[in-house]
Amino acid sequence: MGQSRNVLLICGGGGTEHDISLISAKYFESKLALIPDINTVYLCIERDGRRTNKIGQQCELRKAGEVFNKETQETIALDYAIPCIHGPPGENGHIQAVFELMGLPYLGANPEASISCFNKVMTKLWLDKLRVENNPYTFARELNPQTLQDFEEFFEKNNQDIYIKATHQGSSVGCYHILKKELIKEKMSEALKLSPIVLAERTSRGRELEVAAFDYQGELHISSPGEIVCPEGFYTFEEKYNPDSKTVTNIEAKGIDQEIQDKIREMARVAFIGLGLKDLARIDFFLTEDNVPLINEINTFPGHTPISMFPMMMENLGIKYEDYLKNRIFKN
Ligand SMILES: Nc1ncnc2c1ncn2[C@@H]1O[C@H](COP(=O)(O)OP(=O)(O)O)[C@@H](O)[C@H]1O
Ligand SMILES: [Mg+2]
């Protein structure tokens, strides 16, 4: 190796997960600092769209794969990029498309796989095709008498207990637990203000599990399932990020039969490969009261905050995060 690499660490974005992305970026900065021959080039996409570096100087990401500092007129040629952005424009594949145009290698899924996972309906269509079990669902692009009737029938068919969700969102934004028929219309409408498609799903009673899936040294690794224990049974935005959250996470879910664990890891493997993922993903499951694992969703750029499960699940497999990053960066 020997030769130093300029690694773009881009974070922020205009979405609801802007602040979370900055916390994840701190984790990446600390890990990148442990790798010899890495020069971290920090760039924040501010809420107003400006790009700023660590000390607030305005910068520009240029087509040639460079960061141009507008204040010092300095240019840094990039070797690799880490799109540390949760939600748009990171997890929806947009920033990856920019890197593709620049010919810049980057961490994580390509634009197509990113959008397939960011759009919860597209994910489910793929899971069905791959014969990976997930909750029954229906979806619509608009609210009209037919789609409302379809959702109401779906509600009746599923014990009057469903979730309605905005499809292109994360952090439980635009996600509603519906136990009253009267709420369907209002929540469909709210979800459609937040994303182009609205999804309804049968409610899973049971446990919420997740695995870390990642490529390392030429092999796809899948952790054993971790668990989110959420007292209210609904892992809301507040439960995810509020310091007073009552939710507990366990890196290794307790008391799950080996056979079920193997099934979960196999489902994650089929989904990772089938959806064309690369480098990393956190794959979230429900384990129903009847012990049936179902995939809930796939996060192509999971949180890396101090309470996030993805890095902990990787380290629990005995792989240091800095070694993983080094392996990814120097592979290119
Ligand atoms: N079908 C469902 N059954 C039970 N709980 C659900 C269901 N869908 C969502 N939830 C609850 O809502 C949370 C957020 O939903 P999720 O689909 O994971 O969206 P996000 O991308 O915002 O995390 C889940 O972690 C879970 O607690
Ligand atoms: Mg989720």
Image: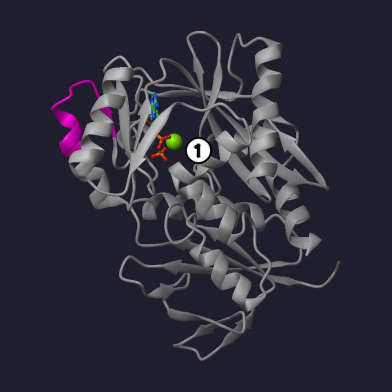
Does 279 sit left or right of 119 as displayed?
right
Would you say residue 224 is visible in this rendering? no
Above or below for 71 versus 1? below
Residue 255 locus on image (x, y percent):
60, 8
Q: Is mark 1 within 8 Å of ligand 1?
A: no
Q: Is residue 177 magenta?
A: yes
Ligand 1, by image quadrant, is top left
What is the magenta range?
A: 176-187
* Residue at x-position 85% and y-position 69%: 2
Is the residue marked by circle 1 packed among few (<14), some (14-19), or many (20+) residues within 10 Å?
many
Expressed as whole percent of the image width and height from the top left, the position of residue 124 reads: 50, 38
Name the residue beneath numbered marker 1. Answer: 124
Residue that lies at the very extreme toward the front in this rendered image: 146
Q: Percent position (x, y) of residue 280?
A: 64, 46
Quadrant, the C terminus: bottom right
- Name the residue at 71% across, 12% down: 258
Q: Percent position (x, y) of residue 144?
A: 19, 44
> In this orientation, which residue lies closer to the viewer: 215 or 138?
138
**331 in the magenta segment:** no
Q: Quadrant of residue 36?
A: bottom right
Considering the numbered disc 1 on the image, is that residue within a helix, a strand or a loop?
helix
Identity of the residue drawn at 65% across and 15% down: 260
Which image quadrant for residue 191?
top left
Q: Quadrant of the N terminus?
A: bottom right
242 lies above or below 6 = above
Q: Which amino acid type is marked by label 1? A: Lys
Position of 41 with respect to 329 (left or right) is left
141 or 96: nearer the eye? 141
Residue furthest out toward the left: 182
